[in-house]
Every structure is written in C-alpha cells, then in structure tokens.
Image (cartoon, helix red, strand yellow):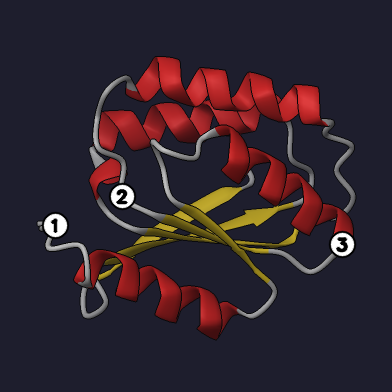
Amino acid sequence: MPFTSSFVPDRRILRTTISFPLTFTDIRGHVSMVRRDGTWAFPELVDARNIGRVDFSARDMLGVAHFVRDVLGQRPVAPRAVVVDTDRGFMIGRVFSSLVAGWIRVGIFEEIDAAEDWLVSQHEGSGARFD
C-alpha cells in the first residue's frame, strides 16, 4: 500500500506519505483505515510529492469525495493539508478540496513547512480538541 502514516505527538498531527503508484483501491483502503483507527479526528499532513503522474479526472475526484463521505459520514473531520509538486497535482487537489468544502477543510500546498503551519493554525484557532 502506498500510504505510510505516523502520529507526530508534539504537533498533534497525523503525517501521511503517499508513494507511487496510487490507485483508487489504495485511496479507499486509506480512508477505511482512517475511520477504523479514528484518525479522522486529527489534522493530517499528506505528502503527495512522490506519487508520480496520476490520471485522475474531476469525475474521479467526485467519486473519491462521495466515498469519503459514505465512509466517514457525519463525523467532524479535522483539516487536511496536501503537499504536491506538480501543476496537475495542485489542480486535482483543488478539485477535491472544492468537492468536500463545507465538510472537510483541505488546503493544497507546494511547500511542506507552509502546509504544516497552516494545518496547525487551523486546529489551534478553531477551539476544537484533537485528543
């Protein structure tokens, strides 16, 4: 599975790295794991810089968004920050973030430090507890 996750206790975030190749089966497996482990309640920093070329369309991203909603239901999902290194990755990420807007706050970034700072500020400023 191309997803590797670990919890960063001092920042209280889940760090996930995605590697090549990435399939919809892999995405579904990761989302199911997030539900099973309860990590949907923790802000997640997703490093997607090493997934290579993905040919996901806007329609594909809609399918992923529906799957995420079906699996996680009405749970209050913590913010997600996704780091990409290509224009296509940025576009795909923005499409997904717009599809889940109003339910999950997703930021798309090109710099990992900026993504982590944004992620921490999102949950520190919200008054929400992630423990």
- Residue 101 x/y as whole percent: 49, 40
Are dots 2 and 1 in contact, CB under 8 Å? yes
- Residue 118 x/y as whole percent: 43, 74
Three-letter amino acid code at the position of disc 2? Ala
Work out which quarter of the rendered image holds the C terminus and state it.
bottom left
Mark-to-mark CA distance, 3 and 1: 33 Å
Q: Residues within 10 Å of mark 3 (few under 14, many from 20)?
A: few
Near-viewer residue (115 or 25): 115
Q: Is residue 20 above or below residue 46?
A: above
Q: Is residue 53 above or below residue 61?
A: below
- Residue 5 x/y as whole percent: 44, 55
- Regarding residue 5, the answer to whether it shows in the image is yes
Q: Quadrant of residue 103?
A: top left
For the residue labelled by badge 3, is the local secondary structure a helix, a strand or a loop? helix
Q: Which residue is mark 3?
A: 87
Near-viewer residue (118 or 47): 118
> Residue shown at 63%/54% (left/top)?
18
Q: In the rendering, which numbered label is found on residue 115?
A: none
Q: Residue furthest bottom?
A: 113
First of labels 2, 3 by sequence position: 2
Near-viewer residue (58 or 85): 58
